[in-house]
Image (tube, rainbow, N blue to C red):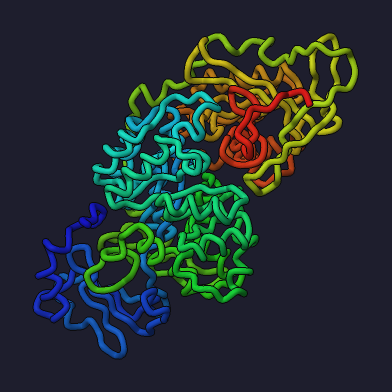
Amino acid sequence: MLNHFCKEPLWQCNGALVRVAQGLEPADTVIRHAKLVSVTTHEILPDADIAISHGRVAYIGVDGHTAEHCIGPKTAVVDAHGLYALPGLMDSHIHIESSMVGPSEYARAVVPHGTVAILADPHEVANVRGLEGVRTMWQDAARTPLKAMLTTPSCVPAVTGFEDTGSSVDAAQIADSMTWPETVGLGEMMNYPGILGGEENAQAEVAETLKADKCVTGHYVSPDTDRGLAAYIASGVHACHESGTWQDVLARLRMGMYAQLREGSAWLNLPGYLPQLIASGVDTHLCLLCTDDSHPHTLVDDGHMDRVLREAVRLGLDPVTAVQMATINIADCFGLTHEMGSVTPGKCADVVLVDALAADGFNAQMVWIDGQLVAQEGRALFSVESFAWPDFMTHTMELGGQLVPQAFEYPVDVPDGPVRVRAIKVTPGDTLTQDVIVEVPAKDGLLLPDPAHDVCKLCVFDRHHGDAGVHSRGFATGFGIHGALAQTVSHDAHNLLVMGDNEADMLLAAQTLEACGGGEVAVEDGHVLALVELPVCGLMSKERVEVVSDKVSRIEEAWRQMGCVLPSPFMTMGVMSLACVPVLRQTNRGYVNCLTYQFEDLLA
């Protein structure tokens, strides 16, 4: 398979690499005296040399051999004494949009942390603006050295018939996307009920990906790890990042599925199963690391895949094994090991020099992508101008006249007094929710929130179809806020999600986002406390990641001021409409039971 993510195909430069390796032609760059992490043999090779030419590794000098014979008058020589040389880090599953910046700005944020490649599923943008929006994103991505590899969004909408999105994707579009040079696979197949139930389009999307000999990634959250999981894998799904427990991880590995171990900004899954994985002693070559979703402040303050490696080592994982999970294992999963994932002759020269292999280490000192030095001491050595986003990507708040005071009222034909209603209860630090019954007051034919018992109103508005759109009413508990919160980052349809303990603040929050083109806002007692404007599809900013991070920090402070103590509450709120993860969700069409896939009534 031709790797479109390398500077030069091997067939075109293999002769030059042969000459460099033998000292008949000088290398472009030689890295000397590094401690090379060999992910192919699970070793650390002391005092190793790496010779680079044509964007590829031509020679590695180990066991007393050196690359002195590869050095010419114009060769750049780097002394890596005391540093560890790793293959460039890869993220096996991410959504760029969760960083709230576009692909080029995302690259500027993660490359200095040693990330050289991402397997990105842009289903957020696809739900708003379809595959045309995805192609526009990749025009921005192509302006940086980061290898942004596309896994085409498979579930737009996430589960058919339960929400209204701005676009849709079918098997014919998947087949076409498999011919794009940036495509390496199919994005997470969240519609596992469709796969198991024989839904024609879901199975056809997988089939088109398999026909193109590309990887199918999954999203399996069913508790059935017997027949259901076996059937899902048998359909062709190759990898899955939705393991909630050690039992989930082990079941996937035993059935030959790659288990993508996740440590994002909100979904902190590694502590829940990595210690058991280590203690079990099972082979880890099918284990991959991923972030799934990383907030801008996480990238700015803590890092990217280097952060995940630090956490894995802190939890007891052998450092070399951890590096394998972020490099060669990922390349193997996606059929890229012939050119990526290791520092070995012939492979792309994606190399990172880090200070230490420890829980406080993995700090990148120098980063090369295809032999080009692209970052040094935490700073990107490349820059890009602001991307000129087309109008169709920046005018996506199509709400019509839905935002009126009456939209936030809950009319009900019951006597005044307490009324039992269904509510979504959130779980701190997890994607899972609970379906709970709570009591709220009814007065003058209207249901009211109950702030004293942490029960807020939750409204979801279709923002894609103007006056034709419909909205739903529900309740949520677990946030502990006074005031209102609203955001257009509401997976996966990314409709307008508004939560609050009073109607006036909810209306102001919704109208504020309509006016700025989408984003995230916190309102209390008639005042906007903080606002993050995300005018690109209501998902991404046009500003620098540091600016967005500062705005997110301010809004998180506003959340705390309003009474919320959840970790990364923005992302917790953002999945309350995600109709493919148990147990109860609320889309613009109403409550969805994500175990039975039926709509549920508001009144219990």
Q: Residue furthest right?
A: 417
Give 355 or 369, whichever is nearer the viewer. Answer: 369
Name the residue rendered at 32%, 57% in the picture. Answer: 374
Q: Is residue 45 above or below residue 29?
A: below
Give 114 or 433, whichever is nearer the viewer. Answer: 433
Instruction: Please say whether residue 561 is visible from this viewpoint.
Output: yes
Residue 498 % position (x, y): 64, 25
Q: Is residue 278 above or below residue 487?
A: below
Name the residue rendered at 64%, 20% in the picture. Answer: 472
Residue 27 % position (x, y): 17, 72
Q: Residue 347 lies in what quarter of the image?
A: bottom left
Instruction: Please say whether residue 547 is visible from this viewpoint.
Output: no
Q: Is residue 276 above or below residue 479?
A: below
Q: Residue 549 lies in what quarter of the image?
A: top right
Quarter the C terminus occupies: top right
Name the residue rendered at 69%, 36% in the picture. Answer: 559
Q: Give the total of numbered labels.
A: 0
Q: Residue 1 lies in what quarter of the image?
A: bottom left
Residue 414 % position (x, y): 84, 13
Name the residue rendered at 45%, 45% in the picture. Answer: 188
Q: Is residue 411 above or below residue 265?
A: above
Image side of residue 94 versus residue 331, left or right: right
Give 148 or 532, whichever is nearer the viewer. Answer: 148
Residue 136 % position (x, y): 32, 33
Image side of residue 529 versus residue 441, left or right: left
